[in-house]
Image (spheres, coloured by chain):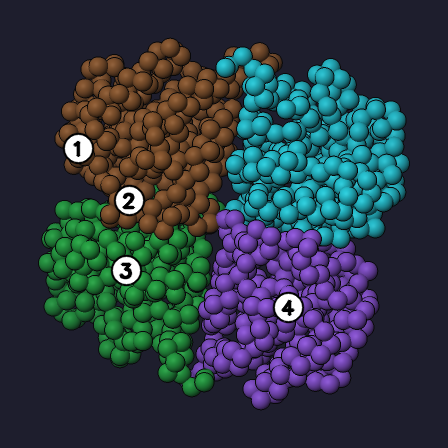
Chain colours: A green, B purple, C cyan, D brown
Amino acid sequence: DLPLAFILGPCVIESRDHALKTARFLAELGERRGIPLIYKSSFDKANRTSANSFRGIGMDEALRIFEAVKAETGLAVTTDVHEREQCAAVAEVVDILQIPAFLSRQTDLLVAAAETGRVVNVKKGQFLAPWDMKNVAKKLDSAGASGVLLTERGTSFGYNTLVVDMRGLPIMAESGKPVIFDATHSVQQPGGRGDSSGGERQYAPVLARAAVAVGVAGVFIETHEDPDNAPSDGANMIPLTEIDGLVAELMALDAIAKGRGSGR
Amino acid sequence: DLPLAFILGPCVIESRDHALKTARFLAELGERRGIPLIYKSSFDKANRTSANSFRGIGMDEALRIFEAVKAETGLAVTTDVHEREQCAAVAEVVDILQIPAFLSRQTDLLVAAAETGRVVNVKKGQFLAPWDMKNVAKKLDSAGASGVLLTERGTSFGYNTLVVDMRGLPIMAESGKPVIFDATHSVQQPGGRGDSSGGERQYAPVLARAAVAVGVAGVFIETHEDPDNAPSDGANMIPLTEIDGLVAELMALDAIAKGRGSGR
Amino acid sequence: DLPLAFILGPCVIESRDHALKTARFLAELGERRGIPLIYKSSFDKANRTSANSFRGIGMDEALRIFEAVKAETGLAVTTDVHEREQCAAVAEVVDILQIPAFLSRQTDLLVAAAETGRVVNVKKGQFLAPWDMKNVAKKLDSAGASGVLLTERGTSFGYNTLVVDMRGLPIMAESGKPVIFDATHSVQQPGGRGDSSGGERQYAPVLARAAVAVGVAGVFIETHEDPDNAPSDGANMIPLTEIDGLVAELMALDAIAKGRGSGR
Amino acid sequence: DLPLAFILGPCVIESRDHALKTARFLAELGERRGIPLIYKSSFDKANRTSANSFRGIGMDEALRIFEAVKAETGLAVTTDVHEREQCAAVAEVVDILQIPAFLSRQTDLLVAAAETGRVVNVKKGQFLAPWDMKNVAKKLDSAGASGVLLTERGTSFGYNTLVVDMRGLPIMAESGKPVIFDATHSVQQPGGRGDSSGGERQYAPVLARAAVAVGVAGVFIETHEDPDNAPSDGANMIPLTEIDGLVAELMALDAIAKGRGSGR
């Protein structure tokens, strides 16, 4: 029953300047609010709907930027890995290795991530039931992961639509692992725009409130100063200016959910 | 942004004594907590999985019991109607007419309920999208309903399973009608036991917390002093002894959700 | 392993002339092809998406038209009933009483239909699993139905979408009842146009071919000389001019499926 | 409208002897029936539910076995690749590179497979809509694939369940690519046994018949002389002794579906 942690950042690293500016903003917010905060950004969008979409700046440049973010803001950082070979290099800089949902069943990738000695955060595949994640956690444990996080980010529901089953949060927690709720990917509409994925940004705070009231270890929210012009996932990211209010509301709900509220 | 209302009671009327005893218990709780509380119970289970299941005590006897509940406790009462012909008689006693989810598209039943002049509470069909309910509300409005409530109780998700899409709550609220969340039917497993429906009682408070944090006008929770031996829906009803703690927690979440909390 | 039966007709009775003209067309086709053929049309659309949609011509006028269709063409006829009270009157004229999918769990309606002594054809609810239909069949059997047909018409799959699980056909057949496949309602998009249901007519023959190859007792196809201008369900009805070719193809697949083909 | 092709073989390579024995059996069958036949087997099960499940014999040994199968039977062969690095080596021996469903959106793997100059067969992700596959095909085309096949193997439907939407077959064919139907993985119950995936073998022929009647370029069926004792996917593989009868029936349906039948 630790206080709610926040994994925040822009979907993709756009440039050193953009990353540092966003990280500074979030670090200030985190300090002021007194919350555990991890900075998240991707260096490669390896499974875009279309081959013509922006892929990212590449791993080596990204790692230098993560070093700078850590040095300047003191924030822990996390990013996603897509291939076995990336794990060791990424783990030299990044505190938490994230496994993408589509790859949540790829044993070799899970093992390579676990063997780095870093904490591994696995997104639950859109095709998995909450109780399936205990097998994923076991794969990581038996490969020696120093820590495992399980993240809910929606389940396939008909075509081009995800639904979040809030029962999945306590079910995943039965594994003994901290459960994170990814509010922005949960409102994605995969492939929903024909050549790219759509999203319904307005429901990310709705689902975040619900998940925190149920009880989670942390929330994952992608944020950007101008989502409509972001190179990736703009449709579901939350504007940076709205993060502070959302954090405050989630903290209040978390206090109730974890029994430190005045309601009893 | 009125305070959270509660619709509470046993799934089905078992006897005059049982109804009165439960109603007295709930009335005391409601008064002590200062909450709007409506007593709910069914007189007929018209769509049981199997023809051999308990059907109920019948409408006439039920209406006498509702009169007694109202006279003795002062609670408003609600029950579900299944056929056009029942509406007028039921409306003489019952304050809110409830339309079952399977029947949420039956125009004649909706019109007959609306024409009684009572408030009508429609459960969203398991086969409907949240945005489909605006057409249901329009059918009721144009038939002169004095008030309309829309209740979420889960959506078909694969076989014998329901899922609650929390985005549906604000979507239904766009109709301008108060939205109720039915926590106990949302955890039903329709037909899940072969000859009867199963349920996962332990997730009803989970979903109730989520819905209230998102923001709803009321919650609907079926409750019984001994759910495992109840004649209907025992698998998903909440024990009467747990209602008070749940009400307190939901009130605290509601205060945050409606902006009267201390979190901002 | 009787040859494939066909239930054909316009979604709704538009007028005596229209019904007779369509019935004559279908009777000629049925005789020429040597197929069992039942004429279907509805007298009331009791669960339209919107209250403003066309409801139908009413039961009494419809029954006179069914009498004329039977007298003039010799076809058996079927229509759907929505309320207990309709069953006896409809059964005086109509050979098969059809229970709508939304009402497939309403015990009183099923019993009233069974007690007429006519064959009852129940559409599987969009919210039911194939194995749930054995309980529906038992309700009808124990009420003395002279015959029971079970019809597949799609299952809820996300929002405003149906999917047909072809495994459901043999699963429903385990009940011992003949299984019908409703090709045109299976391609409905319930509520998909906001104020009315959409449909994808082009996939009705696709699904009919699949179902017949799996093996069914009959297919149900709504047809109209001008679907785009029909008062109901135009989006999924098949043009009358395409019925003959589809019947021929389905007969050929049925012969293979039922082992009378040359493929073995 | 070429005659139906068959991709057949045991889920996983168990040994050189087992592979050759199965391939000889299938080659004889293919020649006798006059059908295009490709031999399929996996060398690595990279995404097993549990880390304790059988993984496979490894790539190098597998490639020597595929060489032997080709040399001795003359069959074309196919297998699945899981990492970019495997593509070039596998393509030296194997005629068609298969991309697993979970990896169907991994751009780098698709590109590496396409660049080998071999035909690439992509299984549609359980989380994708049929129309999403046109973007996958474009990724392969723009990377220079010499040929692209798209395979349906079911879509997520609730938890631990897949459903096949037969409309997806013509929708995928609109891409201009041949569409294959994978009958045995479509009846998998992913994670359905807790520590492993279940399956319902009895419905694989049901779905194969449906898909062939709709019209496909080929069917994919995993087969084994003793499925109940197979090291992988035993629950959904078809016994080798039943393949010949199924092939005959599918050929007869294919002839009707492709207009060479006598039904018109």
Circle 1 packing at 10 Å, graded few (<14), some (14-19), many (20+), is some
Badge 2 marks a residue whose secondary structure is loop
D180 to B257, vertically: above or below = above
Q: Which residue is mark 3?
A: A10
What residue would you read off at disc 1?
D59
Give the side of residue C252 with respect to residue A12, left or right: right
- Label 3: how many residues lie within 10 Å, few (<14), some (14-19) or many (20+)? many
The residue at which mark 4 appears reads as B11
Alpha carbon distance from label 1 to label 2: 17 Å
Cβ atoms under marks 1 and 2 closer than 8 Å: no
Chain containing mark 1: D
Q: Which mark is residue C52?
A: none
User: Label 1 near label 4: C-beta < 8 Å?
Assistant: no
Residue A232, position as x, y percentages in the image: 31, 52
Where disc 3 sits, the SS reads loop
Q: Residue at x 79, y 48 (%)?
A: C112
Alpha carbon separation for disc pair 2 and 4: 44 Å
Quick check: A122 left or right of D216?
Answer: left
Q: Which residue is more in the foreground, A21 or D128?
A: D128
The CA distance from mark 3 to mark 1 is 39 Å
Residue C16 x/y as whole percent: 85, 33
